[in-house]
Image (cartoon, rainbow, N blue to C red):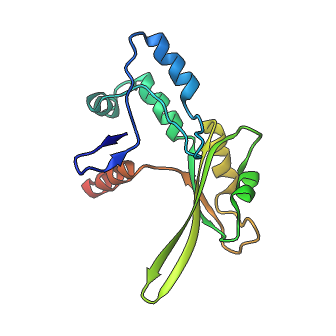
Amino acid sequence: MHKDAEGTTKDYGYVCFKDSAHADAALKAMDKKVLPDGKFLIVNYHVSKKEGELNQGGRTIDPRTQGLAQTFNSNVYIKFIPLDVTEEQLRNQFSFGDDSIVSLKMNTTVKKFGEYEVKSQYAYILYNTVANAQKAIQRFDNQNLFGSPKPIHVEMWVSKEEKEQERKRKEDR
C-alpha cells in the first residue's frame, strides 16, 4: 500500500523482477486472483505515464497496455438492481458457466433529496473474458429482470479518469 500526497492510503504496489520470464509467470499466476476478503488483484506490467500518453496519440498500442485494457474491458457496471435482489441471485443470473465471474461486488447507496431518501442498488462484475462481459451487456442491458418494472442498465465499467477525459474532449469540441 502507498500513501498519496494527501496521505490517503492506496492499494497498489510495484514489484521489480530481474528476469522478464519471472514477471510473466507472476502475472499469469496472480492476475484476477480473488483474495480472502473478496477483493481481487489486477496484475499487469507497469506502463509509465509517458508511454501511456504516447500510446493514446494514435501510435501502435504497447502489448502491456492492451493487457491492462483487456482487464478493464471485462468489468461491467450494473445499476437499477431491485433492492430485494441478493448477490447470489445476481451471480446466478449473470453467470455464463462456473468460472465466468471472477469477482462480483454489490452495493447499496442512499441519496437524500430534501427530506426524502432514495435507496438504489448497483454492482460491478469482473468477467474472465471480454467476450463474457460483452455478452452480459448484450443480453441484460435494458431488460426487466427479477420481476422489476424498471429495466436494469448494464454497461462497461469506466474509470473516473476516463470519464473526466471524455468530458474534457466534449468541452473542447
User: Where's residue 141, x and y in %?
Assistant: 64, 58
Query: Which one is in front, 106 or 164?
Result: 106
Extreme residue in the bottom direction: 115
On screen, 69 above or below 116? above
Extreme residue in the front direction: 36
Q: Residue at x 57, y 71 (%)?
A: 120
User: Where's residue 48, x and y in %?
Assistant: 30, 29
Q: Is residue 116 left or right of residue 163?
A: right
Q: Is residue 21 left or right of residue 142?
A: left
User: Where's residue 62, x and y in %?
Assistant: 40, 23
How many numbered dots are placed on residues in this image?
0
Picture quadrant where residue 52 is located: top left
Q: Residue at x 27, y 45 (%)?
A: 4
Q: Is residue 24 left or right of residue 17?
A: right
Query: Which one is in front, 8 or 172?
Result: 8
Query: Which one is in front, 27 or 100?
Result: 27
Q: Residue at x 68, y 58 (%)?
A: 87
Extreme residue in the left direction: 5
Q: Is residue 33 left or right of residue 139?
A: left
Quarter occupied by the C terminus: bottom left
Quarter occupied by the N terminus: top left
Q: Residue at x 34, y 29 (%)?
A: 55
On screen, 68 above or below 29? below
